[in-house]
Amino acid sequence: LFCHAIKLDDKDISVEQPIFCRFMGQNFDCNNIESREILEKVMDKDCDNIDTHISIIANALVNKTYEKVSILKQINYFIIKDNPHTDDYDVFDKVKKAFGLYQD
């Protein structure tokens, strides 16, 4: 999801990489080398169906509100660092809704 948020506006990967690596280290015990490899591999791939990824993550995080909010905070940070666009927030809203944190 983070890679998609980075890719969405062709953000500068060298600027986003430290943020991504820090998050991966804090939440998934990945070191910087592993995190960089993940980021580079995903950035090189064509973006397939983001809805599938959102669904998988939402299912994995059932009853884990703290983790869901943490992910949303990170996605939001990637979005607001640059000039936010409607497409950015469409992804954010999709994730928020899939996580069951969406209120009308």
Image: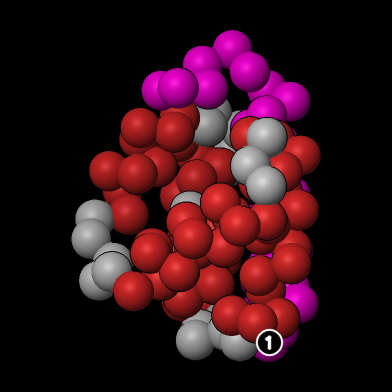
Type of secondary structure dominating the magenta stretch: helix
Question: How is colour applied across the structure in the image?
Answer: secondary structure
Q: Is 49 left, or right, of 65 in this rendering?
A: left
**Residue 51, placed above or below residue 3:** above
Residue 37 visible in image = yes
Q: Of 70 and 34, which appears nearest the observer?
A: 34
In which quarter of the view is residue 98 placed?
A: top left
Please say whether residue 76 is visible from this viewpoint. Answer: no
Q: Position of residue 61 (x, y in %)?
A: 53, 22
In the rendering, at what x and y percent does residue 101 appear? 61, 33
Secondary element at tag 1:
loop
Task: Decide if residue 70 is on the left or right side of residue 47.
Answer: right
| Residue appearing at x 76%, y 39% in the figure | 26
Residue at horizontal 68%, vertical 22%?
65
Q: Nearer the viewer, residue 6 or 83?
A: 6
Q: Which residue is mark 1?
A: 83
Marker count (numbered):
1
Is 15 located above or below residue 76 in the figure? below
- 84 left or right, relative to 87: right
**Where in the figure is residue 33, as x and y percent of width and height?**
61, 57
**Quarter assignment of residue 64:** top right
Residue 4 position in % (x across, y down): 45, 64
On whether residue 88 falls in the magenta region, the answer is no
* Residue type, mark 1 in image: Asn
- Quadrant, the C terminus: top right
Query: How many C-alpha atoms fall within 10 Å of the one at disc 1: few (<14), some, or many (≥20)?
Result: few
| Residue at 67% across, 47% down | 31
The segment highlighted magenta reads 59-84
Front residue of 79 and 14: 14
> Toward which corner of the image does residue 47 lie, by quadrant?
bottom left
Q: Residue at x 55, y 58 (%)?
A: 2
Indicate whether 69 appears above or below 35.
Answer: above
